[in-house]
Image: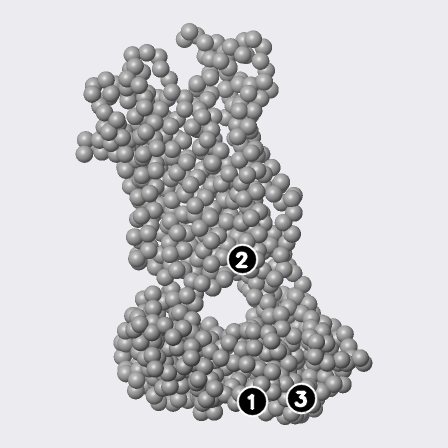
Amino acid sequence: MRNLNIAIRSLFKKGRHNVMKIISLSVGLSVALVMIAKIYFEQSYDTFYPDADRIYRIYENYSMNGKEEDYYQVSGAVAPAMRSEIPGVEDATRLTYIGGDNTLFTTPDKQRYSARYIMMADSNVFDIFPVPILSGNPKVVLAKPWYAMISRSLAEKMGGIEKVEGLTIIPDENPGLEVTIGGVFEDLPQNASLRYDMLVAMSGMDPESLNNWLGNDRYAGYVRLSPGVTPDSLTPAIHDMTLRHHDQEALRKSGYELTYTLRPLLDLHSKAGEVKNMVMMLGILAFALLFTAIMNYILITISSIVNRTKEVAVHKSYGASETNIHSMVLSETLVHMVCSIMVSIFLIFLCRDIIYDLLDVSVETLLLSKGALVLLGVCVIVFLVTGLVPGCLFARIPVAAAFRNFRESRRVWKLCLLFLQFIAAGLLVTLLLIVGRQHAYMVNSDPGYSYDRLAYCSISAIDSTTRYKVLDEVMRLPEVEAVSTSYSLPFWSMSGNNIALPESEKELFNIADQYWVSNGFLDLMEIPVIEGRSFTENIPVSDEVMVNRAFVEKMKEFVDWPDGAVGKSIYISEHDRYGSKYYTICGVYENYIMGSLIDMDARPSVLFYRQRPSAHLLVKFHRMTPDAVGKVNERLKELMPGQEPKLTVYSVQMVDLYSSSRKFRDEVMIGGLITLIISLIGLIGYTNDEVNRRRKELAIRKVNGATMKDILRIFLKDVLRIALPAILLGCGISYFVAEHWQQQFVEKIPLSAWIFLAGALFVCLVVLICIVYRIWDVANEDPVDSLKSE
């Protein structure tokens, strides 16, 4: 306690640099702790569910012509059959999305609200995924067709939990449908892999879809196994179930093999490739920051040995043991650590909005959870390292230092610590250049179609007659160059269907099905037709299909079309119910990116024509200006009363596709800048120590004719001797880190040598500026002032 009191009283003592130590440690600690908390959060997905270790998701594993794939959704009959037919499966449930991230709906009083994801679910869904029920009985509610349970936050937006039960809502995308709210459940934690604001009774789904065994694989199927049962032990039973329900002969004829496997719920998020990549990169950032902050604290502490040598020696001469010295240093470190943690918490909550934007998790969730124990453990490790290392150095000061002019410089220690800090700075600054260039490349890449003057909005809530009117009226506006509609948009994740030839039942490969477009779609998007022609327009029913270049290349593996693909007939699963059984290829369009460069759909693709306008309106402007977009929005509101249509600028959406890359770029930028600043604080501290230690030497050199250049050369040579190899080593490490990070992208920037050279030169330039700035005043001092005490 005595040592703590002394440490607190000496907190602002001159020459200790305690404020600098606390600030640099707290800044590094705050960012590193947030990143470590995010890593823990990503590994904790779904752990809040009871028996989460016994819950598994059903995956389809299929083979088509020898090519094996898996899929995370299954047909409607699979999950219930596993529950009823396979011993060891304790329970099973299904869910399927019917509404996206911002699904709008209207209440009887004409109020409009939005829900984040709407799913249909079996009535036993809360048996497998239990959450607190605030009102209603989900077993009863989710057994009635078109009844729903909603989340607490959505209920509160709509007036309160007690007011929503029995309320009828109408989704914008299905204006003929009424959904009755029958109960309220507690909001899901942020680390839930299944996200929904509303669950609608699965019994409202088409019975054919619910009882289907092949195709329409839209359902997320989950099972809970009995205690002690493993997925491997159920493999024979799953195989037998497949044999009972699948027509094996028909599957063989189509070149198709299908079975099912179970994957642990707890691994679905944490073992995903993009999550593992993110965790690794955040771990590197957190380690570099924390390591730099610790090294800088130790460096500043060691620098104070010069001024505290006699103090420690006097303590020893009065009988203080090495244990007492360690206790004294640890007490000081504890005070500094507590102050740093308090400042860190303040900084974290001060920047809570920035943290949420970058990490998509609230500060409260990161810090006020079980992850807090991990952060506490990190703080303990930091305390031990920053306390024990300086303590060992202080304990080695000899008692004789109290009686003679003994001065410790610990120069080798300081240079080693600076070397490590420069490695971290070189690593993060170079990594920032690479991440920034990769992000800019993706955002500015050519997707294969034109979108710079394009905007879109959903018109699914209106009937066909009104859609025709909307198209005509919008086209009349002078700001508009062209309009069209489409079922899907290129950056979406596409559904899949299978291709076969008319003379064979064998299915050849799976394609990305973009479904229908209307008049002028290809011209509006400026997608080149490289063979044949575009659709024959203005016909009620079309048996034409367009395919992309990749489709033609893929077909060469199965059939020889010497005169090209145009005019050939193909079978496409699912589409036989919409008109013709076979479709004729009328044209081939150039490949374009579906999805994004992070998650690109590389399958061949097809387009169908439908005269009736589809669900999404596409508007191409002569000049894309806020006024032009505003005028079209106003006209849409007039044409769609009771709705809230609003155009989304396509280019904005394309930038948002790479928001994860932007956020990581910003994280690296923050980490790199803080690491560089902390390293420079250490460098300035080292330079100050060297200047004070060698002040008389410099004065003598100046008396003997040394110039400013000579003095600068002495210090620059001293620092650059360790800075250059350290920075180059950091840049070399960044190459391997960046190479691993780039594996998630389909198209990558080349890791050219000039990027690493630029990063190294930048760090070196900053180091040179800091040294010159600090040495300039000293080099201009009158040498007499430094020597008059001799």
Residue at 34% in and 76% down: 224
Residue at 36% in and 30% down: 301
Q: Is residue 613 visible?
A: no
Q: Measure how far apart labels 3 and 2 are at the Cα level.
A: 45 Å
Residue 83 in the image: state x and y as whole percent: 36, 83
Residue type for callout 2: Ser
Dot label at residue 661:
2
Local crowd at mark 1 within 10 Å, few (<14), some, or many (≥20)?
few
Note whether 310 is above or below 592 in the view shown: above
Q: Which residue is mark 1?
A: 249
Note whether 455 is above or below 172 in the view shown: above
The residue mark sitting in front, 2 or 1, is 1
Along the polypeptide, which appears first: circle 2 or circle 1? Answer: 1
Note whether 269 is above or below 358 in the view shown: below
Q: Which residue is mark 3?
A: 504
The residue mark sitting in front, 3 or 2, is 3
Residue 373 in the image: state x and y as whole percent: 30, 52
Along the polypeptide, which appears first: circle 3 or circle 2? Answer: 3
Residue at 37% in and 86% down: 85
| Quadrant into which the C terminus falls | top left
Residue type for callout 3: Ser
Residue type for callout 1: Glu
Q: Secondary structure at mark 2?
A: helix
